[in-house]
Amino acid sequence: MARLAGRRTLFAVPVLLVVTFGVFAIAAASPFDPVKAYAGTAALGADQQTLDRLRDNLGVDQPFAARWWHWLTSALAGDLGHSGVMRQPVAQVIGDRLVWSALLCAVAFTAAVLVGTLLGVLAARRPGSLVDRTVTSLAYTLEAAPVFWIALLAIWLFALQWDVLPAGGLTDTGSAQVTPSQVTSHLVLPAGVLAVSQLPWFTLYVRQGVGDALAEDPVRGARARGLSERTVLLGHALRSGLLPVLTLIGSRVPELITGALLVESVFSWPGIAAATVEAATAVDFPLLAALTTLATAAVLAGNLLADLLYGLFDPRVKLSDM
């Protein structure tokens, strides 16, 4: 396990270098002017000399390769730079917002796995039944639905029509402090929407895996020995059928991050999404590079976790061979 983690860590280093270099190259080709984004409305009345001085102070007149190298060496020394658009150190921007994005993704991912497993097992018990057709049809429908459309529909239904959940934000309007009860009520809709966007994949994978396991000889033998259907389903078929789902943990991380960005934007959730959008439109090189590196590292960590779980739970797979 340690050897696999070490190899993947070494592999991640050049990947992160290429990704960060690409971010600076793409940002340099962006039509947005970072100086005007930094100055805001004050740039409308500023003369060219003032803008040139500001450009020199921000260092955006340098080649993108020089800016990337300066950011990289500073980041390795523990300094992620200063965000021009947020007017804060990059480390502070990420630290203030990462906890809320992590909370949203963790709750949504856990709910998607649990509910998807339950629905998949129910559908696999009797292939072709009404329950199977209903669950499968619902999964394919949700799979095709854009996450922002689901989010807007949820706001219209639960916040505007029924008025049972807040439409967005982290706390109630006018609240002076963040309380667990307010965070919980405001988390329900965005986490639920994000979970629904991930739900079809787990449902369909579990249905296929458990359905195939129920047709295998060991499960048939368990039934022939007179074991109860619940024991056969949960003790034999589910254990074997969940193995393919472990691969989803890594492959769904990019989609989870993308979905979280959209959900946070729609629900005004104070996570990484708003910072990412503002960093991209303002060509905020230090913040954009740090956020992209963080997302890339999350994807690589998800792939590593999936491989480790698969090697631990599948006796046919040896971690030393991976």
Image: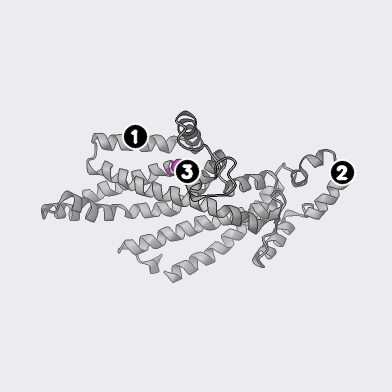
- Judge from the rendering whether residue 160 lies leftward or rightward of residue 311; answer left or right: right
Task: Find residue 48 and name its label.
Answer: 2
Contact, mark 1 vs mark 2 (Cβ under 8 Å) = no
Q: Nearer the viewer, residue 146 or 79?
A: 79
Question: How far apart are the alpha carbons under marks 1 and 3?
Answer: 30 Å
Q: What residue sits right under mark 3 in the picture?
A: 185
Q: Nearer the viewer, residue 49 or 6?
A: 49
- Image coordinates for residue 17, horizontal then vertical, percent: 61, 60
Would you say residue 192 sits in the magenta stretch?
Answer: yes
Q: Nearer the viewer, mark 3 or mark 2?
A: 3
Q: Residue at x 14, y 54 (%)?
A: 227
Question: How far apart are the alpha carbons under marks 1 and 2?
Answer: 60 Å
- Secondary structure of the residue carrying tag 3 is helix
Q: Amino acid at mark 1?
A: Ser
Would you say residue 169 sits in the magenta stretch?
Answer: no
Question: How far apart are the alpha carbons under marks 3 and 2?
Answer: 49 Å
Q: Quadrant of the C terminus?
A: bottom left
- Secondary structure of the residue carrying tag 2 is helix
Magenta-highlighted residues: 187-195
Q: Earlier in the sequence, mark 3 or mark 2?
A: 2
Q: What residue sits right under mark 1 in the picture?
A: 137
- Image coordinates for residue 283, horizontal then vertical, percent: 70, 47
Quarter of the image for residue 311 reads bottom left
Q: Nearer the viewer, residue 300 or 195?
A: 195
Q: Earlier in the sequence, mark 1 or mark 3?
A: 1
Q: Amino acid at mark 2?
A: Gln
Q: Amino acid at mark 3?
A: Ser
Does residue 68 sit above or below 42 in this rendering? below
- The local crowd at label 3, few if under 14, some if 14 to 19, many if 20 or more residues have their Cα within 10 Å, is some
